[in-house]
Image (cartoon, rainbow, N blue to C red):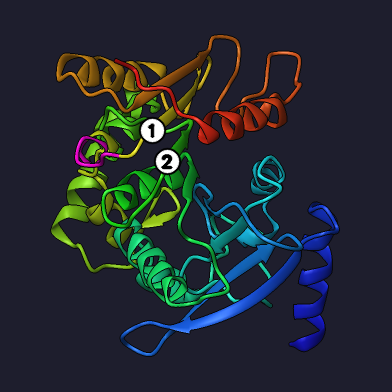
Amino acid sequence: MLNRFNALAALTLLALPQAYAIDYRELSRADGTPIYYTLDKPAGDTSGLLVLSQGSGCARAASNPNLAIVRAAFPDYAALIVEKIGITPDVEISDPFGDCPAQFYDNYTVSQRVADYRTVLNALAADPAVNIANTILFGGSEGGLAMAMLAGRVPVNATILLSTATGETFGDMVLSTVPPEAQEQVRSGFEMARNNPQSSERLGGSTYRFWADGLDLRPLDHMQKATAPFLLIQGGLDGSAPVAASRTTLAVFAEKGLCNLTYWEFPALDHGLTDPAGTSHLPAIATMAAAWAQNPIPAC
């Protein structure tokens, strides 16, 4: 196990500037099961804490290349990544949507994920070596839903949501991406999940437990309760988190006179902020987002 653990550390270090010191940590939940997380810090003083949250699936977040890109845009911050339940430092996953550990299938939900982040952040608040006075949340896709929920539950300075269908429930967002001829079958599966909320039976690669927890979650409901600034980043060609859902969020904030939302829409970019020619614009947009986080301008 130790050799694999060291190999993981080496791979992750390759994805980040070499000045970072990555600290692999473990914390216990109330039931005694472990939460695994990484905290990497630049040399010297830090400007704050960047909390990163990846999208769907059970792939190890610490080696997620997109999170590494975002992390690099905040070079003077410490960065926190909390692994999903059941994802250990030495786990081997061949398919992050079909070959996940049993503990993941038996326990993972978005609400449970948010609870883990809260547990870790509460622990870090008591650590004098970690600067949480300026905390930035960043989440993409399903990770954006988790960070939107977290934003109103812990003290943060700003939240950045990428490719997140904030104006729709999670269930409606999924349905919007399903061909019309298959929607009735998916709705039937959702109903089965609602009727069996503790079941590990799977629908579309996720358990009934996961669907029952997440179907009615809508990021917008949580965003309206938070007071810190939000930056919502949306690609106009996003086929997984439709642009209409982000525009709904913008309209609701405007109608209610809420001034803590900044909205960036890139018409020719997809869910991963890649253009039709296959070029990723995530590095440039992450750098722009980091600059925004230094001085969020009120929307009204």
Query: Mark 2: which amino acid?
Result: Ala
Quarter that holds the C terminus: top left
Residue at (22%, 24%) from the top-left corner? 258
Residue 120 to residue 19: above or below: below
Which label sits on residue 178?
Answer: none
Examine the image and state in which quarter residue 133 appears.
Answer: bottom left
| Disc nearer the start of the sequence (2/1) | 2
- Residue 250: where, in percent of width, then height? 30, 18
Say whether residue 111 is magenta.
no
Q: Which residue is mark 2?
A: 158
Write down the region rendered in magenta. Answer: 221-227
Towards the viewer: 64 or 18 = 18
Residue at x 20% of width, y 20% of height: 252
Q: Is residue 118 above or below residue 299?
A: below
Q: Residues within 10 Å of mark 2 (few under 14, many from 20)?
A: many
Residue 156 placed where, x, y %?
A: 38, 50
Quadrant of the rendering where the N terminus is positioned:
bottom right
In the displayed structure image, the side of residue 272 where residue 22 appears, left or right: right
Q: Position of residue 123 (x, y in %)?
A: 42, 76
Q: Amino acid at mark 1?
A: Phe
For residue 23, side relative to residue 162 (left or right): right
Quadrant of the rendered image containing residue 273: top right
Out of 140 and 122, give the one closest to the viewer: 122
* Vertical placement of residue 31 versus 66, above or below: below
Q: Position of residue 178 (x, y in %)?
A: 38, 28
Quick check: can you spot residue 35?
Answer: yes
Residues packed near mark 1 inside 10 Å, few (<14), some (14 to 19) or many (20 plus)? many
Q: CA distance from mark 2 to mark 1?
A: 6 Å
Q: Identify the residue under disc 1.
A: 230
Q: How many numbered marks appear?
A: 2
